[in-house]
Amino acid sequence: MAKPWATSHISTVASGLGIDLRISGDVKSQLVDILEHQLKIVTREMENQTLESDPERKTLDDPTRLRLGFSRTRGMMIDNISRLDSIGAAAVVAANEQLENYLLRLLRLSSDAAAIERVGTIKPRHLEKALERMGGGIEREDIPTNEEIEGDPIDDVMGEIGGEILTPTLLRKMAKKFAGKPLDNDALEELLLLYYDHAANIQHDLQDNLANASHIIQMIERFQSLTMLGWMRRMLKEAGARAERAESKTVTLAHIVEVDPWD
């Protein structure tokens, strides 16, 4: 029988989440029990979804997405540390999350460059343009730092929620809160594409109407709507309701495309 987390660890984790208030010993104990119960729910849900997607699978997986290989990432991280002896699992997960977010942004920008040329394939020149927008050319040997990525002009378009840039992880959290169900990969990709498309349309519209003061005001209002993501919450709620009526355990692409995003 595995032991749960130590109560002292709870306050350490809470501090890392930005909680500065002292947590009483009784609350820490309750939080351990609550998290243990929540983990049971999460694990059983992941087990069910893993077997639904692959009945022959013997290992619990993340059924909602494919990730960069844990062992490969850990091995390369070990090659790059000089003052520490080993790599913790949490560090590998965090690194993979950053790499996947970076990859997503890089491919989105590359896709935009390809779309401008009206071609259906991302080619090296499109990748080069994307890297230039993210602060470095294709010859760079180092991966851009968080500061460089956060300085990307597209972040101004994407907006923030409570200090967080819209990411697949944040979108999944929103789905569980507003739709009450997890998103499958296709539904997640569709929502991110809608967000990027809307942001790009606003940006292009604003650039084409810089001399029109009233139009600029309208664009600012659209930016505010975009960054507050009220439309995303509405979409998730409606898609979640459709999934519930269909007795589906997840919100799928079909449930997303049935909702008008700008109604």
Image: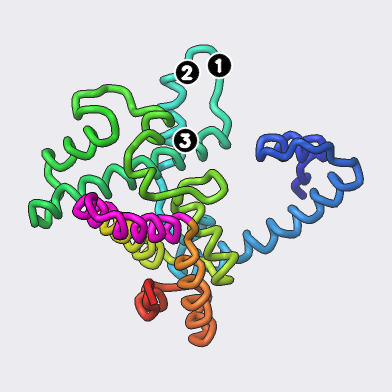
The secondary structure making up most of the magenta span is: helix
Query: Nearer the N terminus, badge 3 or badge 1?
Result: 1
- Residues drawn in magenta: 203-227
Discs 2, 3 touching: Cβ within 8 Å:
no
Is 12 above or below relative to 50? Answer: above
The outermost residue toward the right is 26
Quarter that holds the C terminus:
bottom left
Judged from the image, the secondary structure of the residue bearing numbered disc 3 is: helix
Residue type pointed to by label 3: Ala
Residue 100: % across, % down: 39, 44
Query: Nearer the N terminus, badge 2 or badge 3?
Result: 2
Query: Which corner quadrant of the image does residue 77 belong to?
Result: top left
Instruction: Kindly identify which residue carries mark 2.
Output: 81
Q: Is residue 118 visible?
A: yes
Instruction: Kindly identify which residue carries mark 1.
Output: 84
Label 3 vs label 1, nearer the camera: 3
Disc 1 crowd, CA 10 A, few/some/many (<14, 14-19, 20+): few
Residue type pointed to by label 1: Leu
- Foreground residue among 80 and 22: 22
Disc 3 crowd, CA 10 A, few/some/many (<14, 14-19, 20+): some
Q: Is residue 196 visible?
A: no
- Foreground residue among 139 and 36: 139
- Foreground residue among 45 and 3: 45
Q: In the image, which disc is placed on residue 95?
A: 3
Residue 29: % across, % down: 86, 47
Quick check: is 224 in the magenta stretch?
yes
